[in-house]
C-alpha cells in the first residue's frame, strides 16, 4: 500500500509539473510576442518620416501608435481631378502615403487596416476621385479586399460624413491622410462630424507634402490642362485654407454642406488651433 501511495504521489507530481511547464511555456511565448511587437513599434518610430513623405517625426510616431493600439482605419481624402481626367500630384502623394501606412502596419505589426478612399466628382471629370485612388492603391499593391471607395462626397465635410458607415466595427481611430496644407481644416471638420454624431473616435493626422516619390516621377502637366485649384502654388492654397476656416467655419458655420444636417462647430479654442496650424505652415512656406 505504501508503494502504491508513493507511485500515486509521483504521478500527481508529474501532472502538476507538466501543467506548470505548459503554463510557463505559454507565458514565455506571450512575453516574446509582446517584446516583438514593442521592437516593431520602436523600429517603425525610428524610420525617417521622409521615407513616407510626412511632415514630421511627431506625426509618424503618432500614426504608428494608432496602428499598434486599437482598431484603426486609414481614410485618404480626394483632390479635384483635372478637367481632362488626369490625376493631380497631390492625389498621387495622398494615395502613396495611404499605401505606405497600410504596408508598414502589415509588415511590422501584422495588422492590415482597411483603406477608405473618399471623393466624388465635383469638377465633372467623368470619374470619381475615389475611383482614381482605388486604381492608385491597387497599383501600390494594397489588396482589393482592404480598399473601400466612397464616391459621393463633394467637399471635405461630406468626406467626413460619408465615410462613417464604412468604418469597420469596433474602429477606435481614424488615420487621416491628406496634404499638409489641407490637414488643419480637414482634421477640424472630421472631429466636428464625429462629435456631432457622439462618436468617441480619435483622429490621427497623417499629413503629406507634394514632393513624394510618385509626384517626382510624374512629368509636369501643362498648366492649361490643370484645374484652377491644381495650378495653384502651395502658398496660395494655404491662403485659401485660412480663408475657408475663417469664412466657412467661423462666420457661416457648417450648415450648407450636408442636406438636412447641421454640424455644430467645435469649441473656439479648436478653431483657433486650426488657424494657428495654417499660419505656421504659411510662415514656413513664405520664408
Image (cartoon, grey):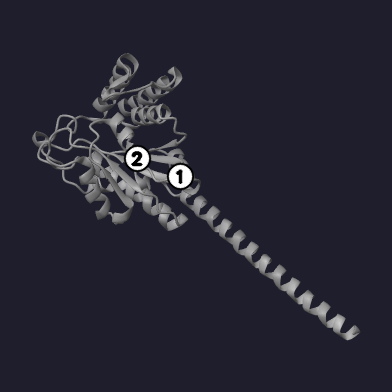
What residue sits 42% from the left and 52% below the top?
105
Pick out the residue farthest to the top: 251
Label 2: few (<14), some or many (≥20) within 10 Å? few
Q: Is residue 208 visible?
A: no
Q: Nearer the viewer, residue 212 or 242?
A: 242
Residue 78 appears at what percent x and percent y? Answer: 25, 38
**Disc number placed over residue 67 in the picture, else none:** none
Mark 2–mark 1 Cα distance, whole angstroms, equals 12 Å
Residue 65 appears at what percent x and percent y? Answer: 49, 44
Q: Is residue 45 above or below residue 280?
A: below
What residue sits 29% from the left and 16% below the top?
247
Q: Is residue 269 above or below residue 46?
A: above
Residue placed under numbered mark 2 in the picture: 165
Apparent side of residue 246 relative to residue 49 in the rendered image (left or right): left
Mark 1: which secondary structure?
loop
**On the image, which quarter does residue 93 sit in?**
top left
Residue placed under numbered mark 1 in the picture: 170
Apparent side of residue 54 relative to residue 15 in the rendered image (left or right): left
Q: Nearer the viewer, residue 3 or 148?
A: 3
Q: Is residue 265 visible?
A: yes
**On the image, which quarter does residue 239 sit in?**
top left
Residue 59 appears at what percent x and percent y? Answer: 43, 39
Residue 280 appears at what percent x and percent y? Answer: 38, 25
Amino acid at each position: 500500500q505504501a508503494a502504491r501511495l508513493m507511485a500515486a504521489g509521483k504521478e500527481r507530481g508529474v501532472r502538476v509539473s507538466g501543467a506548470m511547464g505548459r503554463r510557463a511555456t505559454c507565458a514565455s511565448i506571450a512575453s516574446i510576442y509582446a517584446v516583438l511587437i514593442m521592437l516593431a513599434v520602436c523600429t517603425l518610430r525610428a524610420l525617417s518620416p521622409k521615407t513616407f513623405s510626412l511632415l514630421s517625426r511627431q506625426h509618424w510616431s503618432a500614426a504608428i501608435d494608432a496602428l499598434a493600439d486599437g482598431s484603426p482605419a486609414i481614410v485618404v481624402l480626394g483632390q479635384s481631378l483635372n478637367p481632362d481626367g488626369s490625376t493631380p500630384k497631390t492625389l498621387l502623394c495622398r494615395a502613396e502615403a495611404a499605401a505606405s501606412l497600410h504596408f508598414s502596419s502589415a509588415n511590422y505589426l501584422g495588422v492590415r487596416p482597411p483603406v477608405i478612399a473618399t471623393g466624388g466628382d465635383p469638377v465633372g471629370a467623368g470619374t470619381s476621385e475615389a475611383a482614381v485612388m482605388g486604381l492608385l492603391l491597387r497599383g501600390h499593391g494594397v489588396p482589393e479586399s482592404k480598399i473601400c471607395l466612397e464616391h459621393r462626397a463633394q467637399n471635405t465635410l461630406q468626406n467626413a460624413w460619408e465615410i462613417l458607415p464604412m468604418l469597420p466595427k469596433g474602429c477606435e481611430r481614424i488615420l487621416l491622410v491628406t496634404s499638409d496644407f489641407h490637414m488643419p481644416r480637414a482634421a477640424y471638420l472630421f472631429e466636428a462630424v464625429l462629435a456631432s454624431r457622439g462618436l468617441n473616435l480619435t483622429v490621427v493626422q497623417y499629413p503629406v507634402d507634394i514632393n513624394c516619390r510618385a509626384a517626382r516621377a510624374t512629368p509636369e502637366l501643362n498648366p492649361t490642362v490643370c484645374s484652377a485649384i491644381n495650378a495653384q502654388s502651395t502658398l496660395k492654397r494655404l491662403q485659401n485654407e485660412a480663408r475657408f476656416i475663417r469664412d466657412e467655419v467661423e462666420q457661416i458655420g457648417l450648415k450648407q454642406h450636408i442636406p438636412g444636417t447641421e454640424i455644430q462647430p467645435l469649441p473656439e479654442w479648436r478653431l483657433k488651433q486650426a488657424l494657428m496650424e495654417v499660419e505656421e505652415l504659411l510662415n514656413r512656406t513664405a520664408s
